[in-house]
Image (cartoon, helix red, strand yellow):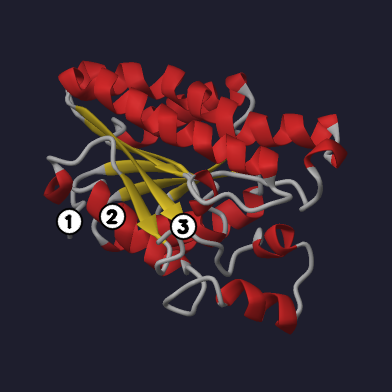
């Protein structure tokens, strides 16, 4: 019960890593707001863990503001924010990615973090405490060809994490990141281009521990970094990748 008495918002929590983080937080005692573009998916996870759901497009400022207000009204305060929602473009030469795809990746992976900070950081500053966790990717430090703009968005997130951490430390707010390798989530096929046994085997051969990341892996790492056990950790980027970045 490391998070007993704490409240948390997890974006993109209707599936994949976000759902794993939401489940772990609830198991550790937190009250969780499950935020996701897919309202039905968010509701299913919220009902499973005894939390509440909010449909939200994290790249829309008005919707993010409504999410923050809903969290305050339902939870009383916001102790933890997990910026997990993310998208990618299909693999392809950098010059072949459409402007629409580029804009979508930057809106969800980059702008959304700014929008959430704009609404929630002032609340954490006023409380004198808080933990923010950004879900980045091994792509930030070990970029793969043909995913250049996705890689770049996650590299931005690492710099943002460290900058947020040093700026917010005097206010008692910690900011960290986790870097998963590809996992069994809805984004897996997008990363690989196509999902075949041969492509899976090739991808797994680059991971020393020999398996994909799981939602449970991310939940375990996130619960630690957002708990008081990690009270001396801020600005860290924890690789949860089976050795992929070695």
User: Label 3: which residue?
Assistant: 180
Q: Is residue 4 above or below residue 119?
A: below
Local secondary structure at mark 1: loop
Circles 1 and 2, Cβ within 8 Å, touching? The answer is: yes
Side (left or right) of 208 relative to 15: left
- Dot 1 alpha-carbon crowd within 10 angstroms: few under 14, some 14 to 19, many 20 or more: some
User: Label 1: which residue?
Assistant: 2
Side (left or right) of 149 relative to 158: right
Residue 200 horizontal/vertical position (percent) = 66, 77
Work out whether mark 2 precedes mark 3 in sequence or the reverse, and give the earlier one: 3
Local secondary structure at mark 3: strand
Numbered mark located on residue 239 in the image: none
Side (left or right) of 38 relative to 135: right
Work out whether mark 3 precedes mark 1 in sequence or the reverse, and give the earlier one: 1
Determine if residue 21 is in view. yes
Q: Is residue 131 above or below residue 206?
A: above
User: Label 2: which residue?
Assistant: 223
Circles 2 and 3, Cβ within 8 Å, touching? The answer is: no
Q: CA distance from mark 1 to mark 2?
A: 8 Å
Asked which quadrant contains residue 28, the reply is bottom left
Residue visible at 78% across and 51% down in the picture: 90
Q: CA distance from mark 3 to mark 1?
A: 22 Å
């Amino acid at each position: 019960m490391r998070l007993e008495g704490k409240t948390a918002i997890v974006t993109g929590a209707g599936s994949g890593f976000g759902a794993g983080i939401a489940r772990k937080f609830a198991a550790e005692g937190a009250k969780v707001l499950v935020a996701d573009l897919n309202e039905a998916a968010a509701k299913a996870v919220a009902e499973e863990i005894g939390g509440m759901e909010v449909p939200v497009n994290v790249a829309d400022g008005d919707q993010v503001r409504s999410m923050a207000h809903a969290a305050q009204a339902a939870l009383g305060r916001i102790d933890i924010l997990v910026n997990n929602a993310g998208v990618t473009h299909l693999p392809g030469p950098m010059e072949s990615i459409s402007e629409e795809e580029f804009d979508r990746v930057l809106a969800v992976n980059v702008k959304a973090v700014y929008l959430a900070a704009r609404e929630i950081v002032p609340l954490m500053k006023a409380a004198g405490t808080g933990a923010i966790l950004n879900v980045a990717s091994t792509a930030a430090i070990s970029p793969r060809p043909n995913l250049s703009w996705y890689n770049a968005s996650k590299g931005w997130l690492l710099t943002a994490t460290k900058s947020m951490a040093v700026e917010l430390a005097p206010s008692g707010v910690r900011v960290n990141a986790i870097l998963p390798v590809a996992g069994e989530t809805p984004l897996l096929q997008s990363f690989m281009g196509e999902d075949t046994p041969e492509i899976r085997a090739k991808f797994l051969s680059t991971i020393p521990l020999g398996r994909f990341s799981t939602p449970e892996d991310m939940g375990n790492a996130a619960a630690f970094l957002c708990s008081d056990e990690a009270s001396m950790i801020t600005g860290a980027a924890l690789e949860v990748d089976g050795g992929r970045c070695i």
